[in-house]
Structures are given as structure tokens and as C-alpha cells.
Image (tube, rainbow, N blue to C red):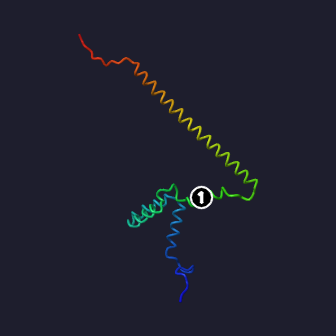
Amino acid sequence: MNTALPYSSSSAQPMGWLYRAESWLDSKGKGAWIAAMVLGFIFFWPVGLALLAYMIWSKRMFKKSCRNRTNTRHLSTVMSSSGNSAFDSYKAETLRRLEEEQHSFETFLQRLREAKDKAEFDDFMADRARAAAAPRDDSPRTEA
């Protein structure tokens, strides 16, 4: 009885090239997926249709980037401890300061938007008041 796995490491895996192609396209980003789909439609439409279906099924069409798997890995690396307490405290302080600056900047942008909206509204109200104060010439003229 043969107890070897159907796809041993010595034999070529039939689906291995698909996984390598998927990884390669993921490393290049969403544009590479779209280009592959368009080329699939041009050369043999069922391939393009299959790529479109796969992109929708795997939600690659709706992600900001296909590289999200590696981005989350880098984020966890940034947040993990390096083992050097001086560096970790410096990193924590820098991240805290950057978050404060981001919050301050977002607050400033909000105040700027509100000031712009108020100025536009004040202009609108001033124009409306001027139009209401101007004498109307709606009365019919009678010529004698």
C-alpha cells in the first residue's frame, strides 16, 4: 500500500503555479489584478470572467489594496516590543506625540471648515438682505 501524500515535495504540485501567480499579483497590487483580468478578457473571455468572479468572491475588488496581509504584519511589528526599553519608550512617546498632532490637525481642519461655512452663509444672508432692501420694480407701468 502506498502511503505517500498525493503531492509530495519531490513532485510538481498541479496548483502550485496558481498560488505563486496569486502571490505575485498580490505583491503588485490591485492594478495587476485588473490588468490580468482585462488581458484575460482580451485573449480568452472565460479566463477574464473567472478572474473577475475570483476578485469579487475574494473581495479583492473592494479592498483598498491587495497588500493588506503584509500591512497588518508590519503594523504588528511596529506595535510589538523590540526588547530595548529605552527604544520602546522613545517609540511610545513618538507615537503618542504623532497622535496628538494628528488630533490637533483634524481639529484645526474642522474649525477651518466651520469658518468657511459661516463666511459663505454670512455672504448669502448679506446678498439676501441687499436683494430684499432693493426697490422692486414689479408694479405694472401705465403710460399716459
Q: Is residue 50 left or right of residue 142?
A: right
The answer to which quarter of the image holds residue 41 is bottom left
Q: Give the side of residue 141 with respect to residue 10, left or right.
A: left
Q: In front: 82, or 19?
A: 82
Mark 1 belongs to which amino acid? Answer: Thr
Residue 100 appears at what percent x and percent y?
Answer: 65, 43
Residue 44 image position (x, y, % from top left): 38, 67
Residue that protrudes farthest toward the top in the picture: 144
Give coordinates of residue 88: x percent, y percent. Answer: 72, 54
In this view, the residue in front, 85 or 51, is 85
What residue is shown at x 49% (from left), y 58% (from top)? 30
* Disc 1: CA contacts within 10 A as few (<14), some (14-19) or many (>=20): few
Quarter of the image for the C terminus: give it.
top left
Q: Where is 100 relative to 136, above or below? A: below
Quadrant hosting residue 127: top left
Above or below residue 56? Residue 127 is above
Q: Is residue 119 left or right of residue 49?
A: right
Q: Which residue is mark 1?
A: 72
Tell me what residue is drawn at x 55 percent, y 84 percent.
4
